[in-house]
Amino acid sequence: MLQLIDRGKIYFYIALLLILLSIHNLNSINFLNNFFKIKKIHLVSDIEKNLSEEIVASLNNFYNFNIFSINSSEIHQILDDYNFIDEYKIRKEYPSAIKIELKQTKILAYFFEDSEKILIGENKKKIRNNEIDLDNLPFIVGKVNINEFFVLKKKLIENGFELNDFDTFYFFKSKRWDLSYKDKIIVKLPIKDIDFSLTLFRGMLENSSTQGVKVIDLRIKNSIIIS
């Protein structure tokens, strides 16, 4: 999260402020107050229209505030409440506008929690959004631990896999995973040495050693059990 400030403009407007305040003229002061009031909040994003409108509405309270009096941390607090936002930049555009650039997080997978559909974003946050298309997203079964999911994701990518190579992830209380590879093969991973197990599985795929195989059990060290 980054705030960009045009320091040259700030110095110019501060100088203007001091000049006008040095003139004991009520009309000039009133003009100055109106001149620096927020009149526009401009949102630039790749987020779908209805969510963008919701964000803009949540920022309405900032209108008519003096642009110098607004602390960017106040805007941060509001934007951080939206879990589907991955990153953002805030820029004060003097004299009376704020520009916010937003980037939506990538949705990686989904699961159900208390019968409610929950999405997992690349930003490691839980997202509640019933309008997201789930067709190409892997499904996680079990009581999901997001940190454990990202550990698995990292190991899969390091071993040449993509999350979408798997349609279902099964997470167990022992912090062990079973993976459903393209709806064809169940791969049972051990609790430890996951990297080595994924290397074995990758080798089997590359050597076409999985034809007709439905289950590959890699839970026992130095063993591959196929059925």
Image (tube, rainbow, N blue to C red):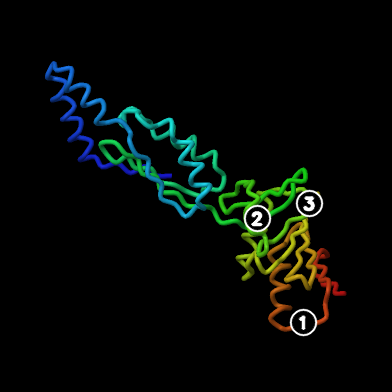
Report helix, strand or loop for mark 3.
loop
Q: Nearer the viewer, residue 31 or 107?
A: 31
- The image position of residue 31, as x and y in percent, is 21, 26
User: Which image quarter is the N terminus in?
Assistant: top left
Which mark lies nearer to you, 3 or 1?
A: 3
Indicate which disc residue 142 carries: 3
Seen at 38% across and 43% down, the residue is 90
Crowding around mark 3 (Cα neighbors within 10 Å: few <14, some 14 to 19, many 20+) is some
In this view, the mark in front (3 or 2): 3
Instruction: Residue type at mark 3: give it.
Output: Gly
What residue would you read off at disc 2?
151
SS label for mark 2 = helix
| Structural crowding at the residue carrying mark 2, measured as other residues with C-alpha within 10 Å and reported as few (<14), some (14–19) or many (≥20) | few
- Which residue corresponds to the image point at 62% horizontal and 58% vertical from the top-left? 108
Label 1 sits on residue: 209
Q: Nearer the viewer, residue 57 or 10?
A: 57
Dot placed on the residue nearer the N-terminal end, 3 or 2? 3
